[in-house]
Amino acid sequence: MDYAIEIIYILVTYLIRIAVKILPIIVLYLLYIFAKVYALSRLSYNRYFDTDGEFEGDDVILVEEITNNLFFPLFFVDVQSYINDLIRMYGLSEDNDATDRQMFVSRFTLMPFTSIKRKHKVFCRRRGKCLLETAEIVYFKKVFVLDSEAVIYIYPRQLSVETVNRIQCRQHMQDSSKLPLFINPFEFVGVREYKYGDPFNRINFKATARLGNKLCVNQYEYMIGRRQMVYLDFGLPSGYTVKEYSEYIEIGLSYCSYLLDKAMNSGYEIGFAANCKMYSQNDFIRYPLQKVLNIEYYKEILQRMACARLSCGLSLSSLLRMDVSDKLSDTEIIIMTLELDKRALEVIEIMELMGNYVSVINIAV
């Protein structure tokens, strides 16, 4: 019996010695956990893009700013958030066909009362409005939600010179109006195939030699182009798949963006209208004819283009009648569409009688 009591005494003494050594460590660890949880809840976090908007296919910078507001150091703090599929963070998956959101994790080590600014290169994948709202820190099954709104508008993709020239060739080959147009010899816009009646001095011999069996002539800007009203028809006629429709509409938006930029740099009047549905519940976009002298006005139109849904809100004829009611005249009207219906053709005839030059471009050709 005495032997058993002695063994128990020795074990208890040994456990007490171990507890005396381990208890401070346990207490310090619990204090560390408590302090870290408290410190994480007091973090300041902010992020933003370095620009309000950028064109599809270009790069932007996403800036993160995080601040430790307490005296307690923080190690290996992971800030995670879902990234909209409109953009792609460099270093993540490069699957261009991915439609799911991607998880982006940024790790920080923060000394007391320290701020860190970090920049990430971002690729603009698709046109649209990209909104990042919140980020999260998950620690011991506790989630800290950080408000960190960042917004960027991704404008329509910029077209290549070849595509722009091809569209302009279609535009200037239209015979929709008897209105006389005066050619500006100082505004060269490309080449097109020779038509009967073209003057000999406009033949482009280099382009003709390159193409071989086609005679080509130089193509110049029209003076009436100082006043342009551009329409983009979002109607989906039969015979087109959703993918084809999407591709053609994106080309149309890109060309409208090109014309807008050209008008702003040249200082002449331009207007834009489209019968697309918007995420703001509107059924169309409409900017009346005016000079684009304010960069904010230019950005506003591009932002509206970025937010355009691939869905028709009202008929093209209804959209055109708005400017007929406003007595639009002496203007070059460009209508980009996949197919014109009878009602739209009737309104176009009225526009021509009002003294406008109308060109219709089939963006699928």
Image: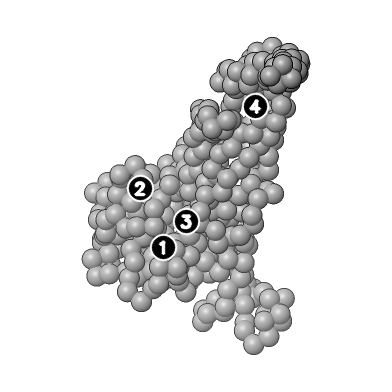
Question: Which residue in the structure is indicated by mark 4?
Answer: 65
Question: Which residue in the structure is indicated by mark 2?
Answer: 278
Q: Is 280 placed left or right of 12 in the picture?
A: left
Label 3 sits on a secondary structure element that is helix
Q: Looking at the picture, which amino acid does disc 2 mark?
A: Met
First of labels 3, 4 by sequence position: 4
Q: Looking at the picture, which amino acid does disc 3 mark?
A: Leu
Instruction: Tell me where residue 1 sits by quadrant.
Output: top right
Separation of residues labelled 1 and 4 (CA atoms): 44 Å
Q: Looking at the picture, which amino acid does disc 4 mark?
A: Glu
Where 88 sits versus 143, above or below? below
| Residue at 68%, 85% in the rendered image | 212
Separation of residues labelled 3 and 4 (CA atoms): 35 Å
Q: Name the foreground residue: 316 vs 346.
A: 316
What mark, if any, has residue 253 been given in the picture? 3
Residue 364 percent across, percent down from the top left: 45, 71
Mark 1 nearby-residue class (10 Å; few <14, some 14–19, many ≥20): many
